[in-house]
Every structure is written in structure tokens, then in C-alpha cells.
Image (cartoon, grey):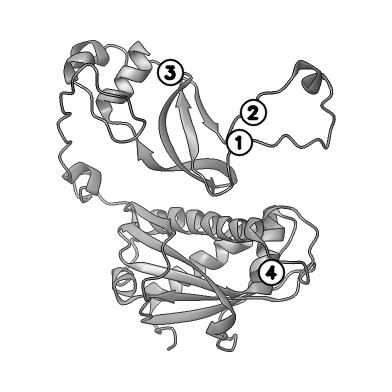
Amino acid sequence: MSAPNDASFTAFIEIWKTAFTKLLTQSGLTGVKTPGVPPLDDSTMIAVRFTAGGCLKGRLQWSAPKRAALQCAQILMSEPIDPNAEFNETHLDGYQEFLRQAAGEAAVAWKLARGEPAELAHQTETKIPFETQANVSFSLDTDKTNTLYLRLDLDAEMLASLAPALVAEAPELGEAADTPAEKAPERAPETLPESAPESTSAIEVSAARAPSSNLEMILDVQLDAVIRFGEREMLLQEVFGLMPGAVVELDQLVNEPAELLVAGRLVAKGEVVVVDGNFGLRVTEVLSRAQRAEAISWG
């Protein structure tokens, strides 16, 4: 299986090259080449899958030999590069995060190229067979690592979603297509008994507890938004004992979602990404509109 020879596929590959280059540059490394790498042995590969959304459809999969995955993780975690180190669960999380950040960059770039929303979400389930329609190999060559070989596989639906031509300029007013969010009607909140337990992701609350007439009056109020990676209780003597280089361990694993707090209250969870050199949060769970009004306005 090889890469198709068309402009849309080439543009998609160039976007990934740029994403990897940006990640490497931020880590003080440079160098990305593609294609031309010999096919890689599937028996030694560690696969990471993504599910597409918006103007992208289907699935794609990144695969790399364990030594390459290890060094990608070491780059992300700013560890000394050692291709002979033992590959552990922390390195697996780091390798996945390396690709998640690249995917975030690629999705943003594709959105700008198409003028439509685009999303690439990490898929944790990899037991379902992946039917490859096309693939292309990458080599990341840096001055601090061995050549890192990776392979990108796309299924038929993903390949088909790349087909439309890239937009050359912004559409005229009124010509832009509706986004999925605009097409989908907002689900009416369910009325729950007052004794019902609270939840951060699934429970709807009564609309009567968040009157829209009052809410409209404060929609232009600015609130502080904070991304929380985890928490830890510390003794005062530990706080005064902090020195440069000290590591404060939090109560949250690397692969657990970060939390978005607005005005000090939890409103969403998601994956941390990098967009144009800045940290961001790709939302995966969010409170209903009524719950958000309840949390922020009445707390």
C-alpha cells in the first residue's frame, strides 16, 4: 500500500510535516523528511489511532518501532535521549501525547486550509482491526536522536474526506456552510428531582434553575478560565522548602483528562494540546448549558 498521488493528500502530509517540525523546534531539535522510508515491520510497531471529526472523517493510525516511540517520548518529556532505555508505561503515555500534540497542530492547520472545523481525537481502543487504504512513511532526523521512523495509515473514509479542493480564499458572507454544531439542535434539559445526585458530565438540571432572561444580562462578563492538571495537599514547611528543580507530584495520571475551571468551578474536561505555541484544551466532556449556568452563576 502506498500514498495516492493527488494534491489534497500531499497537502495533508505537508501539514503533518509542519506539525512535527514545530514540536521538534520547540524542543530544540529540527529535521523532518518524507516520504521514501522503507516499509516498517508491523510486528515491532506501537500504534496510536485517531478518530476524525468536522470536515475530516474516518480514522488514521500512527505506528512506530518501540525505539522510535521511546525517543519521541523522551523528546516530549525533556528526558536525556537514550534509545536503549527501558520502554515503560510513562514512555507510552509520552509517545501518545507527542502524537496528540502533533494531531492538534495538524487539525488546526487543516481547519485553516479548508475554512471548516476539523478535529483529530485520540482513540484509546486499538483492538478493532484497522483497514489501511493508503500510507506514507516519515523520518524525523535530529542532531540528538537516531533517525525516528514513523508510518501514517489512513482508512478509506479518511482518504475520501481529503478529496475536496483546499479553499483559496475566505468564502463570501452567507456562503459558508453550517458547522455541525449549528446544525445539531440543542437537547432540552431534563427536569430531575431535587434529591438527584450531581455529576460533572452527564446530568441535566432543570431549566428553571438557570433562567435565560437573567443569564442574558451577564453573558458579556469576563471570567477567569484555568486548566487544572491535578492537585496535591502540601504542608506549609514543604511549601517553604520548594527550590528550583523540585518536582511536585500531583494526584492525576498523565493520560487522565485535564479540567477546565471557570470562576473556580469545573465546567469541562479534555486533552491538553499545543496551538500556535500556546497550550490549549481540546474539550472531550462538558456540562450542559443549564449546568454551566448553575455552576458559574449560582455556584
Residue pictured at 66% horizontal, 59% vertical:
91
Q: Amino acid at mark 1?
A: Asp
Q: Gap in Å between the C-alphas at discs 3 and 2?
A: 28 Å
Q: Is residue 253 above or below residue 265?
A: below
Quarter of the image holding residue 265?
A: top left
Residue at image point 49% right, 21% down? 224
Do we see residue 179 in this rendering? no
Residue 222 numbered tag:
3
Task: Indicate which label's residue lies in the foreground, 3 or 2.
Answer: 2
**Mark positioned earlier in the residue sequence (4 or 2):** 4
Residue at 59% x, 63% y is: 20
The secondary element bearing badge 3 is classed as loop
Tell me the residue that label 4 is attached to. Answer: 31
| Whole-percent x, y for residue 171 in the image | 27, 51
Nearer the observer, disc 1 or disc 4? 1
Q: In the rendered image, is residue 198 in sight?
A: yes
Q: In this figure, which residue is indicated by the disc labeled 1?
A: 251
Q: Which is more N-terminal, label 2 or label 3?
A: 3
Relative to 149, is 117 above or below? above
CA gap between label 1 and label 4 equals 36 Å
Q: Quadrant of residue 240?
A: top right
Disc 2 residue type? Arg
In the rendered view, would you say 294 is above or below 80? above
- Give the quadrant of the N terminus: bottom left
Please state the horizontal and vertical placement of residue 184, each as a whole percent of the image.
Answer: 17, 44
| Pointer 3 or 4: first along the chain | 4
Q: Give amino acid for label 4.
A: Gly
